[in-house]
């Protein structure tokens, strides 16, 4: 009698190498993205008065932005390609994570203080692919 043994096979994801075009775009737009983010952070921080440490401009493939528990803010360099209202929403969203590190009701109340139509902008941002 033959006994079958089923094994779970682990599939390892491989990272795609960034194309030369993507690297060139990143190098060209990184500093303009940094200038945009810093100016808008300064503008919105007149309202919020949050303390943050560093701002990083990255070439991420899955996230528009993030906020670390150490108070660092990270943004994708493609933020400069977004319409101004979406870029502002993204910056305020990550800035509000400095106070609330979740997406609870208090977090959304903070976002709505300066971006009252955040729900519409959130839906629009989710429709824009990072890979393009």
Image: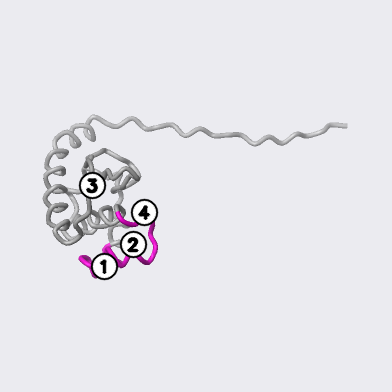
Q: Position of residue 59 (x, y in %)?
A: 26, 38
Pick out the residue farthest to the bottom.
116
- Helix, strand or loop at label 2? It is helix
Q: Position of residue 108 (x, y in %)?
A: 32, 65
Instruction: Decide which of 13, 73 is in the foreground and name it.
Output: 73
Q: Mark 2 or mark 1: name the one nearer the start of the chain.
A: 2
Q: Position of residue 43 (x, y in %)?
A: 12, 56
Is 18 on the left-hand or right-hand side of 31? right
Q: Residue at x 44, y 31 (%)?
A: 14
Circles 4 and 1 in contact, beta carbons < 8 Å: no
Instruction: Decide which of 65, 111 is in the foreground and name it.
Output: 111
- Helix, strand or loop at label 4? It is loop
Mark 1: few/some/many CA within 10 Å (<14, 14-19, 20+):
some
Q: Quadrant of residue 58?
A: top left
In the drawing, what numbered circle is on residue 112? 1
Q: Mark 4 or mark 1: name the one nearer the start of the chain.
A: 4
Gap in angstroms between the C-alphas marked 2 and 1 = 9 Å
Circles 2 and 3 in contact, beta carbons < 8 Å: no
What residue sits right under mark 3 in the picture? 52
Q: Mark 2 or mark 4: name the one nearer the start of the chain.
A: 4
């Amino acid at each position: 009698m033959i006994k079958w043994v089923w094994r779970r096979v682990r599939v390892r994801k491989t990272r795609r190498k960034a194309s030369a075009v993507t690297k060139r775009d990143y190098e060209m737009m990184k500093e303009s993205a940094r200038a945009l983010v810093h100016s808008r952070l300064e503008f919105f921080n007149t309202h919020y008065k949050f303390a943050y440490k560093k701002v990083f401009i990255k070439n991420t493939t899955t996230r528009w932005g993030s906020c670390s528990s150490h108070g660092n803010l990270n943004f994708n360099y493609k933020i400069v390609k977004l319409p101004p209202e979406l870029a502002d929403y993204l910056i305020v969203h990550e800035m509000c994570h400095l106070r609330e590190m979740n997406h609870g009701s208090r977090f959304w109340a903070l976002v709505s203080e300066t971006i009252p139509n955040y729900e519409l902008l959130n839906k629009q941002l989710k429709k824009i692919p990072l890979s393009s």
